[in-house]
Image: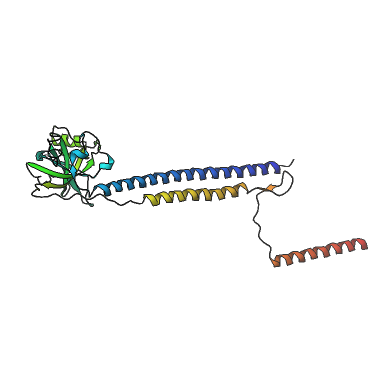
Amino acid sequence: MSTAGPAAADLRAAARRQAVGLVLVAVLVAVTCTFLGRWQWQRHVDRDAAIAVVEANYAAAPVDLADVVPDPDAVLPDTDAWRSVEVSGRYLDDATVLLRNRPVDGTPAYHALVPLLVTDAAPRDAGDPVAAGRVLVVDRGWVPTGADGSVDVDVPAPPRGDVTVTVRLRPGEATSSRDAPARQVQAIAPAQVLTAGGVEGEPYAAYGALVREQPAAAEPLGALAAPSTDPGSHLSYAFQWWVFALGALAAFGVAARREWTSVVRVGDGPDTLRPPRPRRARGRDELDEDAEIAAHEARDVTAQASAMRSR
């Protein structure tokens, strides 16, 4: 009994399993690259929206704090980030808290967070004081950490008495669970800052990045950097991932097709399946050589036939 038939069938089945496996790999790689591209695209969209907010708000004229934040407990909307506002109050200098791990242009630095006891959240309005008694955390700027950050840092004092400050509003950060030395914090979470400074009061959910003070401080701190408007590489990364997805479909698709057609039928019987062998065009020399061999074989056959008749 011939075993070529089952062997050929097994060969065809193995090739087709390999082809299906390649198609599945192509789909998996393409789907993964597509989702990674979508992720980068969404980051590009979010970054564009953040840049648009900065461009609209950063250089705008200041308004009263109460006009932008009528409810001190409310989370600052993203669209109001970087809005310039004015507020009157008194700095609680003895409650200054240092923010750790916020380098400035690669230089290790502490940010000086000083609670401002609000006396009027609408100083531009001639009416009655608004939100008096609330506390707004103000990031007044930065100071170097020193050699290793392990010694006390000399922080220039804010102006004393009643002041009117202009700040750019920022949403309060989430409370950090990381440890920090006394009078230091790892995040600008207003409630956590007041606790670290020993202040009992109701904080604004937002905080302010200092623009200017009236009257001005005798010694200013390092100025806070402007927010970046660099869109980054998210858009190009998104297109790269999508090109990878198309490339995976094309490359694995071609490989799968080759596997699928790598076993062909060359006859009518069940035992005629074999992997195809690459064929090349026969040259002129090969044709002449084949003709010469055929003629030689024909002469041999004629000679043998003559010898048989002579016997």
Task: State which quarter of the image contains the C terminus.
Answer: bottom right
Q: How is the image coloured?
A: rainbow
Identify the residue at image location x=13%, y=39%.
116
Q: Quadrant of residue 15?
A: top right
Provide residue 180's location: percent of width, then percent of height.
19, 38
Residue 286: quadrant of the picture: bottom right
- Decide if residue 4 is on the left or right side of residue 64: right
Where's residue 96, x and y in %?
13, 40
The answer to which of 181 and 250 lies nearer the viewer is 250
Quarter of the image with the N terminus in it:
top right
State the residue at coordinates (30%, 48%). Answer: 52
* Residue with the most extreme front position: 126
State the residue in front, 229 or 83: 83
- Left or right side of 135 for 16: right
- Residue at image position (25%, 42%) is 80
Farthest residue to the left: give it: 161
Q: Nearer the viewer, residue 160 or 197?
A: 160
Residue 190, given in percent of the width and then of the height, sits at 19, 37
**Residue 10 seen anywhere in this rendered image of the structure:** yes
Residue placed most toward the observer, 114 or 260: 114
Q: In this figure, what is the number of numbered marks?
A: 0
Quick check: 63 above or below 236? above
Residue 311 appears in the picture as rendered: no
* Image height of 244 relative to 130, above or below: below
Residue pictured at 19% horizontal, 42% vertical: 208
Residue 67: x, y in percent? 20, 39
